[in-house]
Every structure is written in C-alpha cells, then in structure tokens.
Image: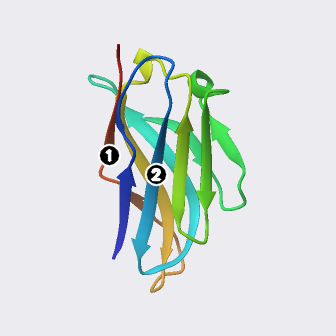
Amino acid sequence: QVQLVESGGGLVQPGGSLRLSCAASGSIRTIDGMAWYRQAPGRLRELVAHIDSGGSTNYIDDVKGRFTISRDNAENTVYLQMNSLKPEDTAVYYCYAAVVRITDWRPRDYWGQGTQVTVSS
C-alpha cells in the first residue's frame, strides 16, 4: 500500500509564510505527477500547483509569484512554499501523487489526509 503524509499547516498572519511537506511511502516503483490542491469551506477542491517527474511546474493564477512547488524524488516528497499569504488562501490543503506501485505498471491516484492552513490576523 501507499501512504501520503502531510505536515506544515497552521495559523499565520497575512503576509506570512508557511511550507507544506508531503512524504509518500510504501510499495513505490516511481511517482509521476505530484500536486497540491486546496478546499475552502463551501467551495470545490481546486488544483493549486502541479509538478511533473521532470520538475516542470504549473500554478493557478491566484498563487503565481507567491507559491513554489518542488519535489525531492529521492525522498518521494513534494513541498509547497507559500509566501505573502492572504486570508483567501485559507483552506485545507491536500497533496496528490500519481504513484506507480511495485506491483503495477500504470499510475494510481493517491491523496494525503489534508492539512489546515488559516491566514488571519
């Protein structure tokens, strides 16, 4: 089995920074794309940032220039550095990974448990 464990959420003032981490473990052959999503109360879950296995990244317009996604392939970990945080960034943040298990040859979707990020003064 494969697990994604997130850390790094919390309460921060507007303009502050947080760094989220998500480590994948288990029977992993390779990991293709990795991403961070978020879901605010009363809203649908939305993609925030994506990084492919080669390191190419994509962001939604709301976070461009403020958030940076990165990954450590040796550690099967994805990060989200969030700077200049705004109250509207408040949400539960979920990590995602497309994992090829040792027993498989095609990727499967895996999700973390979610971590709360609250931006408030």
Q: Residue at x 57, y 40 (%)?
A: 49
Taking the spot 53% from the left edge, 55% from the top edge, the residue there is 78
Residue lying at the far bottom in this picture: please name it: 103
Q: Is residue 91 visible?
A: yes
Question: Which badge, 2 or 1, comes first in the chain's sequence?
Answer: 2
Closer to us: 13 or 75:
13
Q: Secondary structure at mark 2?
A: strand
- Where in the figure is residue 15, as x and y percent of width and height? 51, 18
Quadrant in which residue 25 is drawn? bottom left
Where residue 85 appears, x then y in whole percent?
Answer: 50, 23
User: Coloured how?
Assistant: rainbow
Cα separation, mark 2 vs mark 1, equals: 11 Å
- Residue farthest left in this picture: 42
Q: Which sits in the foreground, 91 or 43? A: 91
Which three-letter amino acid code belongs to the residue tagged 1? Gly
Residue at image location 53% in from the left, 74% down from the top: 106
Residue 80 position within the rendered picture, expressed as x and y whole percent measured from the top left? 53, 43
Residue 66 versus residue 47 in the image, above or below:
above
Q: Is residue 44 above or below residue 79?
A: above
In the rendered structure, find residue 70 and report the number of the disc placed on it: none
Quarter containing the C terminus: top left
Please, what is the three-letter code of the amino acid marked with disc 2? Ser
Q: Please name the residue that numbered disc 2 is placed on.
A: 21
Q: Secondary structure at mark 1?
A: loop
Q: Which residue is mark 1?
A: 114
Q: Is residue 45 visible?
A: no
Residue name at image x 41 percent, y 19 percent: 13
